[in-house]
Image (cartoon, grey):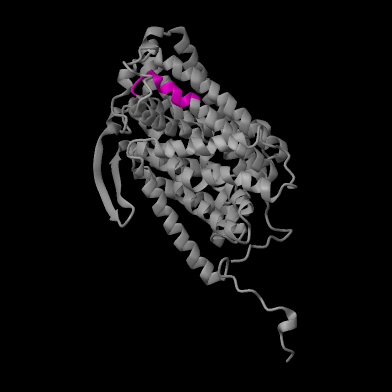
C-alpha cells in the first residue's frame, strides 16, 4: 500500500505543546491510577513492605528505558513514536515494514489495555463512595487450548464498576474531540489536581508516620530465595506499569515545540519527578496502613482503594471522601493522556501506507486524527470487563515482548547502521542503559509465578500479526513479495 500524499492545502498537525505541557502530559500519564491502586498488588507480590524494592529497581529500569526513548525521540521527532523508530532501525523498505506493522498490531491490544486500566482504577475508587457498585451481575471463565502454546485463560465480569469504567472512556473521547492547543491547557489543569493529591498524601503520611508499622517486615523478608526473586519479578512488573508513560510525548512528536530539546527534557524530567513522588508516597502510606490489610483481594477490582482507607485513619470520613474524588481525578487524567498519545500512532502508520487508510484522516475543523481516537476508545471499552491485575499483566508482557526489547536492541543496531544520523540527544553512558533495560525486561518476563500465562497471549498476537502482515504484503506486492520493476533497457519498443 503506498503512502498517502498530503497536499499543501491538507490539514496538518499543530506544534502547540511546549516543555511545560509535555512534562505535564507525561506525568499525568505516568501517575494516573498507578500508585493509588497498585500498592496492594505490589505488597501482595512480595508479601510485605520490602515491596519498596520493586519501585526502587523499577525507577532505575524506567531511567534506562527513558534514555532509549530520549535518543530516538530527539532523532526522529514525528507522530507515531515507536512506529517510526522500529521502521527506521530495521529498514523502512525491508524488515522494518514487518516490525513496525507488528508494533501497530500489538498496540491495537496494549493501548486499549492501558486506557482500560485507568478507567478500572477510577471505577474502583468510585466504589468506595458507592459500595453498591461492587455488586457483580455476571462473570464467566473462558479457556482455549492451542497446539504448542498451551491453554489460554480469560475471565470477564460485569459489575457496577464496569459500567462506570465504560462511562469514563466515553467522556475522555468527548473531551479529546478538540484542537491540540486547547488540550495543552487542559493537561496543565489536570496536572495541578494530580500534584495536589500526591502532595496532600505525602504530607498526611509523614506527619502521622509510624516507623514500626512501616518497617514491620515478615520473617525472611530479605532472604535471597526462589520466592524472593519470583516476588520481585511480579513487583517489578507492576512498578514498570506505574512508571510507563514518560514516553507519551514521543507519540506527539509532530505537535511538540523544539522537539530535539523538549522531548528528552520532558521524558527524563517526568521520570525523575515521578520516581521521587512515588517513593515518598508509598513510604508514607506504609507508615499508616498495616501492610497485612493490603494483602486482601489483590486480584479483584474491589477493595483496592488503599489511599481512601489511609486518609480515613488520619482525618476521618470527610478526608477519605475528598481524597477519593481527587484520586478519581488523577485516574481520569491518565485515561485522557493515554488516549491522546496513542491515537497518533495508527495515524502515523496510515500516513506511511502501513495501516488502514481510514486512520490517516484528520478532522477538517479541529485538525486531529479523529478516526484513530474513536477506534482506540471503542476497544478500550471492551477491556473494562477484566480485572485490573489481569489487564496490567497482559499489557506489560505484550508491550515488553513486541515493543520495548525490540526498541532497546534497536538503538544499538541504529548506532551501528547509521552512525552519522543527527542525534540532538545521545544516551548517557551508551550502551550500558540499553543493555540494562534489555536485562531488566527479560527478568520481568521470566521471574514470575505462572509467567507463561501472559507470554502465551503475546505469542498469539505475534503469530496473528505476522499472518495478517503476510496476507497484506502478498496482496499489495510489498516486502518480502515486492516484484522488481523491469529496467527501461529491458522494455521492448512497440
Q: Is residue 100 visible?
A: yes
Q: Quadrant of residue 292?
A: top left
Secondary structure mostly seen in magenta is: helix
Residue 439 rendering spot, x and y as whole percentages: 50, 37
Q: Is residue 111 visible?
A: no
**Left/right of residue 143 with respect to residue 375 in the rendered view:** left
Expressed as whole percent of the image width and height from the top left, the position of residue 466 reads 47, 59
Vertical arrangement, residue 202 with respect to residue 89, above or below: above
Residue 387: quarter of image: top left
Quadrant the C terminus occupies: bottom right
Q: Residue furthest bottom?
A: 494
Q: Which residues are magenta?
A: 47-56
Q: How many marks?
A: 0
| Nearer to the camera, 95 or 37 | 95
**Place of residue 266 in the rendered image (x, y in percent of width and height, measured from the top left):** 64, 32
Q: Against 225, is 92 above or below? A: below
**137 relative to 74 in the view: left or right:** left
In the image, 83 versus 335, the foreground residue is 83
**Residue at the spot 25% in from the left edge and 46% down from the top edge:** 141
In the shown orientation, is residue 139 left or right of residue 186?
left
Q: Is residue 430 above or below residue 325?
A: below
Q: In the rendered structure, does residue 151 fall within the stretch colored magenta?
A: no
Left or right, 149 with reference to 91: left
Q: Residue at x 62, y 58 (%)?
A: 352
**Magenta highlight on residue 51:** yes
Q: Quadrant of the N terminus?
A: bottom right
Percent of width and height locating residue 175 = 53, 41
Amino acid at each position: 500500500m503506498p503512502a498517502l500524499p498530503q497536499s499543501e492545502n491538507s490539514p496538518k498537525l499543530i506544534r502547540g505543546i511546549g516543555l511545560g505541557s509535555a512534562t505535564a502530559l507525561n506525568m499525568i500519564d505516568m501517575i494516573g491510577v498507578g500508585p493509588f491502586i497498585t500498592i496492594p498488588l505490589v505488597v501482595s507480590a512480595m508479601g510485605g513492605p520490602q515491596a519498596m524494592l520493586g519501585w526502587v529497581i523499577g525507577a532505575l529500569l524506567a531511567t534506562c528505558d527513558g534514555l532509549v526513548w530520549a535518543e530516538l525521540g530527539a532523532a526522529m521527532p514525528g507522530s507515531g513514536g515507536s512506529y517510526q523508530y522500529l521502521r527506521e532501525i530495521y529498514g523502512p523498505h525491508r524488515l522494518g515494514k514487518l516490525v513496525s506493522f507488528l508494533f501497530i498490531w500489538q498496540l491495537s491490544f496494549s493501548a486499549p489495555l492501558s486506557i482500560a486500566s485507568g478507567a478500572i482504577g477510577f471505577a474502583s475508587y468510585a466504589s468506595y463512595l458507592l459500595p453498591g457498585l461492587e455488586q457483580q451481575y455476571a462473570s464467566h471463565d473462558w479457556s482455549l487450548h492451542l497446539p504448542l502454546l498451551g491453554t489460554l485463560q480469560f475471565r470477564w465480569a460485569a459489575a457496577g464498576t464496569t459500567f462506570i469504567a465504560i462511562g469514563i472512556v466515553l467522556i475522555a473521547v468527548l473531551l479529546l474531540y478538540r484542537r491540540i492547543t486547547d488540550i495543552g491547557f487542559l493537561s496543565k489543569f489536570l496536572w495541578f489536581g494530580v500534584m495536589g493529591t500526591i502532595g496532600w498524601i505525602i504530607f498526611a503520611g509523614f506527619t502521622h508516620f509510624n516507623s514500626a508499622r512501616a518497617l514491620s517486615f515478615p520473617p525472611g523478608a530479605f532472604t535471597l530465595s526462589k520466592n524472593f526473586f519470583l516476588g520481585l519479578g511480579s513487583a517489578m512488573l507492576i512498578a514498570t506499569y506505574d512508571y510507563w508513560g514518560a514516553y507519551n510525548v514521543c507519540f506527539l512528536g509532530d505537535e511538540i515545540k523544539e522537539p530535539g530539546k523538549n522531548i528528552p527534557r520532558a521524558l527524563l524530567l517526568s521520570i525523575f519527578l515521578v520516581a521521587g513522588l512515588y517513593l515518598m508516597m508509598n513510604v508514607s502510606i506504609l507508615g499508616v496502613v498495616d501492610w497485612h490489610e493490603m494483602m486482601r483481594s489483590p486480584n479483584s477490582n474491589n477493595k483496592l482503594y488503599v489511599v481512601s482507607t489511609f486518609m480515613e485513619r488520619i482525618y476521618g470520613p470527610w478526608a477519605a471522601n475528598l481524597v477519593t474524588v481527587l484520586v478519581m481525578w488523577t485516574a481520569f487524567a491518565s485515561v485522557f493522556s493515554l488516549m491522546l498519545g496513542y491515537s497518533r500512532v495508527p495515524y502515523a502508520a496510515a500516513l506511511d501506507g502501513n495501516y488502514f487508510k481510514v486512520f490517516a484522516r484528520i478532522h477538517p475543523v479541529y485538525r486531529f486524527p479523529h478516526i484513530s481516537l474513536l477506534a482506540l476508545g471503542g476497544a478500550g471499552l471492551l477491556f473494562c470487563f477484566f480485572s485490573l491485575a489481569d489487564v496490567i499483566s497482559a499489557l506489560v508482557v505484550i508491550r515488553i515482548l513486541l515493543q520495548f526489547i525490540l526498541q532497546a536492541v534497536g538503538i544499538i543496531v541504529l548506532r551501528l547502521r547509521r552512525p552519522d544520523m543527527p542525534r540532538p540527544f545521545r544516551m548517557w553512558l551508551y550502551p550500558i542503559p540499553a543493555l540494562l533495560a534489555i536485562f531488566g525486561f527479560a527478568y520481568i518476563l521470566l521471574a514470575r509465578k505462572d509467567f507463561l500465562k501472559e507470554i502465551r497471549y503475546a505469542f498469539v498476537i505475534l503469530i496473528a500479526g505476522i499472518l495478517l502482515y503476510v496476507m497484506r504484503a502478498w496482496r499489495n506486492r510489498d516486502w518480502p513479495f515486492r516484484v522488481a520493476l523491469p529496467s527501461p533497457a529491458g522494455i521492448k519498443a512497440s
